[in-house]
Every structure is written in structure tokens, then in C-alpha cells.
Amino acid sequence: MTSFNKFIIKKHLKTSVFGKNIYYFKSIDSTNSFAKESPLKKGDLVIAENQTCGRGRKGKSFISNKGGIYFSAIWETEENFDAGVITTLSAIATAKAIDKIYGIETKIKWVNDIYYMHKKICGILCEKSEDKIIIGIGVNVNSQKFPEDIKNIADSLLNLTHKRLNPQKLCTEIINNLEKLLMENSLSEHMDFLKNRSIVLGREIKVLSPKGEYFATALDISSSGELIIESNGEKSILGFGEISLKI
Ligand code: BTN
């Protein structure tokens, strides 16, 4: 643990819930796994500069090299808890923070990826564990090299903007936004942003569902963040659970 970096994070946090306890690691297997295995409480943060076993959705790995920022923020589940809404709010909070710090316009790939210049720069994995919800966010900030198999689809903000900014500063900006949005717990005022920044709306997508793969057109996003699609002339709504998209 490095108190210096923890100090930078605390200094920039403007939160009342997040950051009461900060677990800061130079390297860890996965901040989400640590959060799952530890008796953490609402507001606790687990932050790492590097993950050796970063996890993505559907059991995929998330490359988490040094230079990025990887963290899990703990929220509690309430009766009206909706994982999809929390994931969507997290994506909005993250996109807005990156935009502000870098002066750019990021895009959101429904529901949990942030893109810039057609490259994935951030992934979000929200997991429920007992009565807590673990919001895991990984941003490729200053990482420079990506493995051969993903270098055409993922990149870092440094490579794409040529700006080398402080990952901890970005992290605190995201957490500040995240707390505000989670407290408000309402998607409605962010719908315009969400739709404007969507890279799937109006496009042909491949839906990867447990029942198989099929093509569809992404028509709209519902008021609760679900994706409205049309396939073979039939409209349907995609929930967040098992579905992945290819565009
Ligand atoms: C995805 O791309 O499918 C989601 C990636 C989520 C990565 C973050 S990094 C912090 C947290 N810890 C993990 O192991 N995963 C999430």
C-alpha cells in the first residue's frame, strides 16, 4: 500500500460516502475480487495501479497494465436495486469525468464500455455480493502496450490524446461523479447524454444471448436504460444480464 497515492486520492475527493476507507495497492489480482472477499462497507474504495487478474464481463479477462487505474467502489443494494441502472449510471459518470479531464467526447457502448476514437478505453463490471454492489471500473489511462489480440480494439487515453495525465486525478473525478449520480439514482436527466454518446443506436448489432446469436438494429434506449432493438421486423427489449453486443 502506498500512502502517497492514497493521499492524492483523498485530497481530490469531494464525496461524503466514497472514500471513508481506501485500500490502495500498487498491484493486486483484482480489485473486484478483493472487494468480494473482504468485509467492506458502503463507501469503501479499493484502488490499484495494476491488476494481475483483472476481470471483465462474462468471465473475460481485463488487461490491467501499469499506467491505468483500476478500482472498485462499494455501494449497498437496496430493495429497488437495479444492476442495469447502476452500471449505466457508472458509465455516464465515467464518460463525463474523462470528457472533463481530457476535453474530449467519449462514446458509450451499451452498457458498460467507454470508447474513444473507435477504441475501448474503459470497462465497467458491476457485481452483487451479499448486500453490497461492487462497481468495478478500469481505465486505460497511460498504458502504452496492449497484447496483440486486443490492440486493434483497445487503447489508452495517452496513446489516443497524447496527453499524459494523472490517473489518480481521473479516478477521483470519476468517483465524485459516481457518488452524485448514485445518490440521485435517476437516469432520466441523463437520457440525452446517454443517447447522444451511444455508439450502438441506429446500428446493426450482433446480439450474443444464451439462446444463440442473431442480428438486430439498435433503435433506442428505454427510460430504465435497456436497449430497444428490432430483429426480423419484431421489436424487443434487451436487459442487461447475459447479453453481449458486437458492432
Ligand atoms: C469489461 O470490459 O467487460 C469490464 C472490465 C471491468 C474492469 C474493472 S478494473 C477494476 C475492477 N476489477 C476487476 O477485476 N474488474 C473491474
Image (cartoon, rainbow, N blue to C red):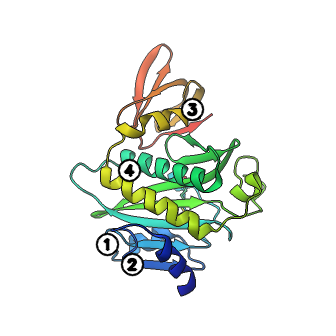
Q: Quadrant location of residue 203?
A: top right
- Which one is nearer the viewer's eye here, 244 or 41? 41
Q: Nearer the viewer, mark 2 or mark 3?
A: 2
Residue shown at 42%/19% (left/top)? 235
Which of pointers 2 and 1 indicates the residue nearer the eye?
A: 2
* Residue beneath disc 1: 41
- Residue in front for this viewpoint, 188 or 102: 102
- Left or right: 229 with respect to 146? left
Q: Secondary structure at mark 4?
A: helix
Q: Position of residue 240 (x, y in %)?
A: 42, 42
Q: Which residue is label 2 attached to? A: 21
Cα separation, mark 4 vs mark 3, equals 19 Å
Secondary element at tag 2: loop
Residue at image coords 35%, 54%:
182
Question: Which of pointers 2 and 1 lies earlier in the amino acid sequence?
Answer: 2
**In the foreground, 27 or 68:** 68
| 105 horizontally vs 135: left or right | right
Looking at the rendered structure, the secondary structure element under dot 3 is: loop
Q: Please report contact status of discs 2 and 1: CB closer than 8 Å, yes or no.
A: yes
Q: CA distance from mark 2 to mark 1?
A: 9 Å
Distance from Cα at disc 2 to Cα at disc 4: 21 Å
Q: How many C-alpha atoms fall within 10 Å of the one at disc 1: few (<14), some, or many (≥20)?
A: some
Residue type, numbered disc 3: Val
| Circle 3 crowding by C-alpha within 10 Å: few under 14, some 14–19, many from 20 | many
Q: Is residue 170 above or below residue 194?
A: below
Residue 56 in the image: state x and y as whole percent: 54, 56
Check disc 3 and report the residue beneath it. Answer: 200
The quarter in which the C terminus is drawn is: top right
Q: What residue would you read off at disc 4? A: 86
Q: Is residue 156 visible?
A: no
Q: Is mark 1 within 8 Å of ligand 1?
A: no
